[in-house]
Structure formats: structure tokens, C-alpha cells
Amino acid sequence: MSRVMEDTTIVQLFWDRNEQGLQVASNKYGHLCTSIALNILGNQEDAEECVNDTFLAAWNSIPPQRPAILAPFLGKIARNLAINRYKHNRADKRGGGNTPVVIEELSEVIPGGISPENELLSKEMLSIISRFLSTLSPDKRKLFVRRYWYADSVSAIASATGLTENNINVTLSRLRKQLHQLLVEGGIDV
């Protein structure tokens, strides 16, 4: 077996209720989940709690779910838990992280007030965003996803990509304008 356990093997450990799966998943994906939670929350202690909750949620989700690739599965759980914690912290006048800036940047593009009653609109908007992302070059898609999914700071993206912060800001601004145009053309009232 390779040094790093394959996702299918880790999922099987979860499926078999073998607690070794938690340790292996934590070793393999703990840094990713911590990074996501920390980017959103800006607080190490809250981020660590979200990561612990992430692995507990995965333990409780497998079975019945059987993800083929764990990184996006765990990343989505961590992101959702961190956003919920962010909302809770914000209600308590606490918080931090990159979330307020990311939300502000996207507020000019994504309509606010999406609620369960507007689920059809939400699904259509997600479909348009997905199509938009598929049209981007891999480098631009990476920038967009790192900023607006993982809530990475512009400086962190610059360090990772070798681009200047100004270049990233300009590129993200153009991408937001392109997305806005596609949403308007798709009938999404922005």
C-alpha cells in the first residue's frame, strides 16, 4: 500500500466503523479543513473546533454516503460548519477572517436574500456559476475558487501563485463582472 492511504480505503474504514479512518482522514485532510475554517473565521480556536466537528460529521455521514473523493467532501463540511460558526460569531459581535471582504466583493454579483422559497432561483444561479467556472482557464478558475470558495486572502493567493496582489485583484474584478453579466443574461435579478 502507498504511504498515503487512498480515499476509497479511508471511506471503507469509516463504513466499517473503524476509528482508524478518523485518524487517517485527519492526518491527510486536517490541514485543508483547518485552512478553510481559518480563512472564514480568522480564529484558530474556532477553526480547530470546526475541524473536529468536520470529522465527526463525516463519521456520522459515512454511511450512508460513500464519497469517492474525500477532499471536496470534507472541505464542504468544514466550509459549511465554519460559515455557520461565522454567522453565530457575527451575531455575538465577534468574528474576523476574510469572510466579510469576500461577501462584500460578491454582493455586487450575487443577489441577496436567497431563501428556501427561492430554491429554484438558487439552483439556476448555481447552474450558471458552474457553467461560468467551466469556461475559465484553469488558472483563473483556481483564483476564483480560492477566493470565493475557500475564502483565501489575496495575499495568500499571491504567495501561492507568484502573481501580484494587484494582478489578482484586477483579475477577480473582471471575473466578477463576467459572472454578473452571465447571471443577468440568465434572468437572475442582481
Image: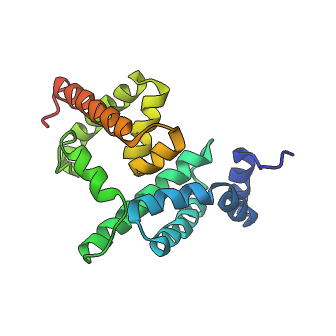
Residue in the image at 75% along x and 49% along y: 9
In terms of image quadrants, where is residue 81?
bottom left
Q: How is the image coloured?
A: rainbow
Q: Position of residue 27 (x, y in %)?
A: 69, 60
Residue in the image at 55% along x and 53% along y: 74
Residue farthest toward the right in the current orientation of the protein? 1
Q: Position of residue 143 (x, y in %)?
A: 43, 37
**Whether residue 85 is visible:** yes
Q: Quadrant of the C terminus?
A: top left
User: Total of numbered circles in the picture?
Assistant: 0
In terms of image quadrants, where is residue 60?
bottom right
Left or right, residue 111 beside residue 61: left
Q: Position of residue 66 (x, y in %)?
A: 61, 47
Left or right, residue 104 beside residue 85: left
Viewer-nearest residue: 160 or 17: 160
**Whether residue 66 is visible:** no
In terms of image quadrants, where is residue 16?
bottom right
Give the answer, above or below, for where 149 lies relative to 138. Answer: below
Residue farthest toward the left in the current orientation of the protein? 189
Give the answer, above or below, for where 110 lies relative to 23. Answer: above
Viewer-nearest residue: 164 or 18: 164
Q: Position of residue 87 (x, y in %)?
A: 30, 66
Viewer-nearest residue: 155 or 131: 155
Left or right, residue 103 beside residue 51: left
Residue in the image at 83% along x and 49% along y: 3
